[in-house]
Amino acid sequence: MAVPTAAVQPRPSIPSRILSSWAESRNALGFGFMLPAAALLLVFLTYPLGLGVWLGFTDARIGRPGIFIGTENYQYLWDDAVFWLSVFNTLLYTISASILKFALGLWLALILNQNLPFKSFFRAIVLLPWVVPTVLSAIAFWWIYDSQFSILSWALMEMGLIDHRINFLGDPENARASVIAANVWRGIPFVAITLLAGLQTIPQSLYEAATLDGASRWQLFRYVTLPLLTPIIAITMTFSVLFTFTDFQLIYVLTRGGPVNATHLMATLSFQRGISGGQLGEGAAIAVAMIPFLLAAILFSYFGLQRRKWQQGGGD
Amino acid sequence: MAVIKEAATKKTKRPELDEGGMGYLQSLPRRVVTVYLPLLVFVIVLLFPFYWMTITAVKPNLEMTDYANFNPFWVVHPTLEHIRYLLFDTSYPGWLLNTIIISTAATFLSLLAAVFAAYAIERLRFSGARQVGLAVFLAYLVPPSILFIPLSVMVFNLGLYDTPFALILTYPTFLVPFCTWLLMGYFRSIPFELEECALIDGASRWQILTKIVLPLSVPGLISAGIFAFTLSWNEFIYALTFIQSSENKTVPVGVLTELVRSDVYEWGALMAGALIGSLPVVVLYSFFVEHYVSSMTGAVKE
């Protein structure tokens, strides 16, 4: 390393020595270096988080600061069937989409982990759905799900599998399935590529040893791949669950919560009540109601992970 | 995750000899059924919406709705009419420009803050650095969907409503934690000895950061920058909430709210808008795909 010798200063005067000893102190310097990020996050993340909790206890509207009304918003929501429907929808959406993303993503990862020609090319194009803006790909799905000109309906009718067009987004059950399918489509690449990275860290020698011991392909997967992949599965699925649970964009583009609130998620309901309806307090209360679920998901994966680390004899 | 990290370094050191593993034990027909066929289905399903977007963007309106006489999967008379309409008769170029300015500014702001924070947490090891590192990670898990209402109140009170600054200042809420986390992982891979050498030679912390650590972490900075740019380009809920006037909108919001009028959907223009809006991130991504994949998996693994 050619560190410039000019960096070595002649012995400095006393004030600048105080200054430099301050600059060498880890804590003071650390504080200075943390300052920009901490300022941004405290002002635009921590403070709004607290403000959101406060707003949930007020009757604030757009253009009118609210007054404290205690738990009135929560009492109202407790008796609100639409709110409970949105909780149910959110859980249904998160659980079914996460399971599908996990199963299909793991399958795709296992395929990509084979010795394929053009491996890196496939890996690159498979990630595309995850790279493009969700809203823009959702618009493409909107057109694919169009009630009159859906290409899916047309193709299925041409193949003779159905005899009338599918009303993808107009019927409650179909709408739920359609938004879950679109979410899975976007989520598979993320799961697949991160699990693929985990798969590539498993040494081939373990498979060879297991094969010599007479393990079947299923046993190879069940007793070698899966245990070694568990930590990365836990992290990937935590991220996936969190992002699915708080999803907004896809629903806003495809259905805006309809038909008859069948696809309203908590995030979209919060937007509808808080911003479109102007009831900031109530919208904030719905958003705050998401926090316990998020905490539960984080804690679940955190403690799940801890045990795994201990089992593998890993420290820290 | 220390185990995986170790395994990862082992993997990279291993010679490429057993790249194929035990693949040779499989017969070709078996591979076709278990590998190539499912892969083909996956690729078709994952790419079909893009194909459909592209083909719709260049289809004349007549062909778009007449499935009886024209096969919808192909286009007989491709037209640039939708793209011309989009670029010259709507505010689309303005939205593109807004998105570029906002994403670039938010990315630079976040990277700047993240470099210092990551270096302080990872290398200065001030008291409480571990806790701060954990807090940064938790900050990344706070989703925009629970912040947009209080943020909209703040943005309004600060007089930033309907200005690009509303977005430039709020995007760092998810960009800073992400970039910090990614750069922490990168700084960890730079040997301590280099910094110790420099310290002995009398370099200040600032000199170490600018002359040794930053030049060595250019790949990490590039991937953090690309990620941050992509995330801000894709952001929707803040842009939808904080921006009202048509000329200040970003591409995702503009396409959705301005191109959709009443019941007559301009599908061709919508698809063209979605396609052109996706192109910058796709091009950026295709140039740096290796960085992208490795740092995405790296960030998750840490």
Image (cartoon, rainbow, N blue to C red):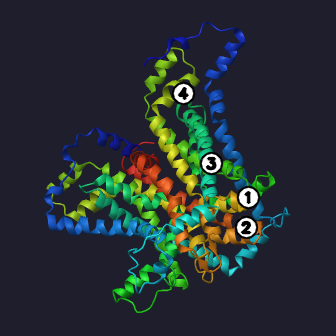
Q: Chain of mark 3?
A: B
Nearer to us: label 3 or label 2 = 3
In the rendered image, the quadrant that contains the N terminus of chain A is top left
Spatial distance from mark 3 to mark 1, Cα to Cα?
A: 21 Å
Q: Which residue is mark 1?
A: B152
Q: Which residue is mark 2?
A: A275
Q: Residue at x 70, y 79 (%)?
A: A80
Q: Residue at x 37, y 67 (%)?
A: A104
Do marks 2 and 4 share a chain? no
Q: Residue at x 67, y 21 (%)?
A: A22
Do marks 3 and 1 share a chain? yes
Q: Which residue is mark 3?
A: B101
Q: Residues within 10 Å of mark 3 (few under 14, many from 20)?
A: some
In contact (CB < 8 Å): disc 3 and disc 1: no
In contact (CB < 8 Å): disc 2 and disc 1: yes
Q: Chain of mark 2?
A: A
